C-alpha cells in the first residue's frame, strides 16, 4: 500500500488504528497542533518518526518513504467476522455504515485489554503483586485492569507493561497479531520471558487457526445463506476492498468460505 506523501501515509495509519490527533499527541508528548502540522505536510524529525511508527505499529520505512508494506493487521477476531459479514449481507449498507460496524468491533476489542494483560501475567507465572511491581503500577490498579473495571487505560500504563514484556502495542490494545515484537527488538529481554511468550503466541495462533476453520465451516454449511448471496457479499466488498485493508481481509475470508462451499458441493455430487 503506497500513498503519495508522508502526510497521506500518516493519516492512513491513524485511520486504520482509529487514533485521534489528541491520542497521538499525548502518546508522543507533543502538542496536538504539531500532529496537525504533520498531517498537513510538515515532516517530523527522524527520531520522532521512529516513535510514530512504533505507536501506530507500522513499518518505519513505509511511513517515511512509502517503500515496502504498511503491515496493518485486522482489528477483530475471526468469530466476530461471521456476525459482521452476515449483517452486511442482510442489508444494503453504505461504506460509512460498514466503517461504523468496524469501529464498534474495535471498541469492543479494546474492552478486552484486561483479558490480554491477565493472559500475559499468568503465562509468565507471576502473581499480581510481582507483576505490578515490575510494571511500576499499584497491585490494586492492575487488578482493576484485569477485572475490566478499568476499560480505557492510558498509553502511559500500556508503555509500562511493554517495558516488562516485549509485546506489540497493537496486540495489547486491540488483540491484533502478532503478539511478540520482532526478534531484532528483543535484545536485552529476559530469555525465560521471551520463551514463555513464544509458547503463548503458538497457543494463541493455534486457537485463532481453529476459530478460522470453524468460521469457514459455518459459512460454508449455512443453509440460510445461498451460494448466490455469498457471491453477492464478495462483490459488494470489491470496491471498498480496493482502498481499505479491513475490507480486503474480510473479502479474502469470504472467498475462502465460497471455495470451501463449492468444493463441498462438488464432493456431494460425486
Image: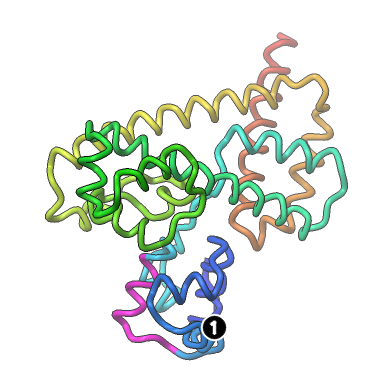
User: Which of the two residues, 86 or 129, is positioned nearer the viewer here?
Assistant: 129
The residue wearing badge 1 is 39
Q: Most prominent secondary structure in the magenta stretch?
A: helix
- Taking the magenta stretch, the answer to whether it contains residue 222 is no
Q: Residues within 10 Å of mark 1 (few under 14, many from 20)?
A: some
Q: Residue furthest right?
A: 92
Q: Residue furthest front?
A: 140
Q: Quadrant of the C terminus?
A: top right
- Taking the magenta stretch, the answer to whether it contains residue 49 is yes
Q: Quadrant of residue 266?
A: top right
Q: Quadrant of residue 114?
A: top left
* Total count of labels: 1
Coordinates of residue 204 in the picture (x, y in percent)? 39, 32
Q: Please state the extent of the stretch shown in magenta in the rendering.
A: 43-54
Q: Is residue 138 left or right of residue 20?
A: left
- Asked if residue 92 is positioned above or below residue 200 in the image, the reply reads below
- Asked if residue 228 is positioned above or below residue 150 in the image, the reply reads above
Q: Quadrant of residue 27?
A: bottom left
Who's the residue at 87% across and 43% down the image? 91
- Asked if residue 119 is positioned above or below residue 181 in the image, the reply reads above
SS state under label 1: helix
Coordinates of residue 63 in the picture (x, y in percent)? 43, 73
- Asked if residue 270 is positioned above or below residue 258 in the image, the reply reads above
Coordinates of residue 230 in the picture (x, y in percent)? 77, 35
Who's the residue at 30% across and 44% down the image? 139
User: Which of the two residues, 195 or 138, is positioned nearer the viewer here?
Assistant: 138
Who's the residue at 20% across and 40% down the image? 130
Who's the residue at 45% across and 51% down the image? 173
Q: Is residue 229 left or right of residue 203?
A: right
User: Which of the two residues, 186 or 26, is positioned nearer the viewer here?
Assistant: 26
Amino acid at each position: 500500500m503506497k500513498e503519495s506523501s508522508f502526510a497521506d501515509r500518516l493519516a492512513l495509519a491513524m485511520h486504520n488504528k482509529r487514533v485521534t490527533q489528541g491520542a497521538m499527541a499525548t502518546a508522543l508528548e507533543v502538542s496536538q497542533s504539531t500532529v496537525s502540522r504533520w498531517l498537513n505536510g510538515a515532516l517530523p524529525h527522524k527520531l520522532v518518526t521512529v516513535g510514530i511508527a512504533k505507536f501506530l505499529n507500522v513499518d518505519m520505512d513505509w511511513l517515511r518513504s512509502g517503500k515496502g508494506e504498511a503491515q496493518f493487521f485486522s482489528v477483530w477476531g475471526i468469530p466476530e467476522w461471521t456476525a459482521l459479514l452476515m449483517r452486511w449481507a442482510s442489508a444494503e449498507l453504505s461504506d460509512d455504515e460498514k466503517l461504523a460496524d468496524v469501529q464498534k468491533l474495535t471498541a469492543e476489542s479494546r474492552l478486552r485489554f484486561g483479558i490480554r494483560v491477565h493472559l500475559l501475567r499468568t503465562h509468565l507465572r507471576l502473581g499480581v503483586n510481582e507483576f505490578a511491581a515490575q510494571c511500576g503500577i499499584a497491585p490494586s490498579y492492575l487488578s482493576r485492569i484485569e477485572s475490566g473495571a478499568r476499560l480505557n487505560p492510558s498509553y502511559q500504563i500500556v508503555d509500562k507493561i511493554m517495558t516488562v514484556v516485549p509485546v506489540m502495542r497493537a496486540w495489547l490494545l486491540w488483540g491484533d497479531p502478532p503478539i511478540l515484537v520482532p526478534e531484532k527488538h528483543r535484545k536485552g529481554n529476559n530469555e525465560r520471558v521471551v520463551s514463555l511468550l513464544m509458547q503463548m503466541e503458538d497457543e494463541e495462533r493455534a486457537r485463532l487457526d481453529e476459530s478460522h476453520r470453524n468460521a469457514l465451516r459455518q459459512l460454508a454449511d449455512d443453509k440460510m445463506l445461498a451460494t448466490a448471496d455469498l457471491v453477492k457479499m464478495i462483490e459488494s466488498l470489491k470496491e471498498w476492498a480496493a482502498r481499505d485493508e479491513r475490507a480486503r481481509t474480510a473479502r479474502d475470508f469470504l472467498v475462502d468460505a465460497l471455495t470451501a462451499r463449492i468444493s463441498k458441493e462438488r464432493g456431494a455430487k460425486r
